[in-house]
Image: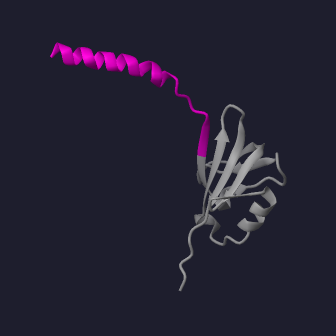
Amino acid sequence: MKFKVLIAAIILGVALPAMAQFRTVSKAHEVRLSDLRLPQNDGGTVAYKPCDECPYETKRTSSDAQWILDGNSLPLDKFKRSLMSITDRRNTAVTVLHHLESDRVTRVSVHPVSQAKD
């Protein structure tokens, strides 16, 4: 019995320093497309509502921010034009990736709802 406790204590002692090294670098916000405001140009600001009752949060975008639609990376202007064709904006999920240390948005990913074909 003492041997099992000793082994558990050793494993725990080895694991604790490794766990202390983890830190949050980025935070992802899942929002609706209808609650997203895109920048006018690269390096602008993105505004989004993290919840229905929450006010808009405004964050600067990084100069090399990624604009992703259905897994494809696009330039900002083409990304914005492509979003205009999405009609169900309330049910379209958007992931906004906010880098905490630089306080910049580094990626905006849109995942349109598939339309059933009749």
Where is residue 28? Give x, y as percent.
Answer: 59, 45
Scheme of colours in the image = one colour
> Which residue sits furthest right?
41
Above or below, 43 against 115 in this view is above
Above or below, 62 against 48 in this view is above
Quadrant placement of the N terminus: top left
Residue 84 lies in quadrant: bottom right
Q: Is residue 18 magenta?
A: yes
> In the depicted view, which residue is nearer to us: 7 or 83?
7
Predominant SS along the magenta part: helix
In this picture, residue 86 sits left or right of residue 118: right
Q: Is residue 21 magenta?
A: yes
In this picture, residue 48 sits left or right of residue 14: right
Residue 104 lies in quadrant: top right
Where is residue 97? Give x, y as percent.
Answer: 64, 45
Residue depicted at 73% across the width and 43% down the height = 59
Above or below, 101 against 73 in this view is above
Residue depicted at 61% across the width and 54% down the height = 31
Where is residue 24? Give x, y as percent.
Answer: 57, 32
Where is residue 32? Give x, y as percent.
Answer: 62, 58
The tally of labels here is 0
> In the depicted view, which residue is nearer to us: 101 or 36?
101
Residue depicted at 66% across the width and 72% down the height = 87
In this picture, residue 42 sits left or right of residue 83: right
Q: Which residues are magenta?
A: 1-28
> Which residue sits furthest left?
1
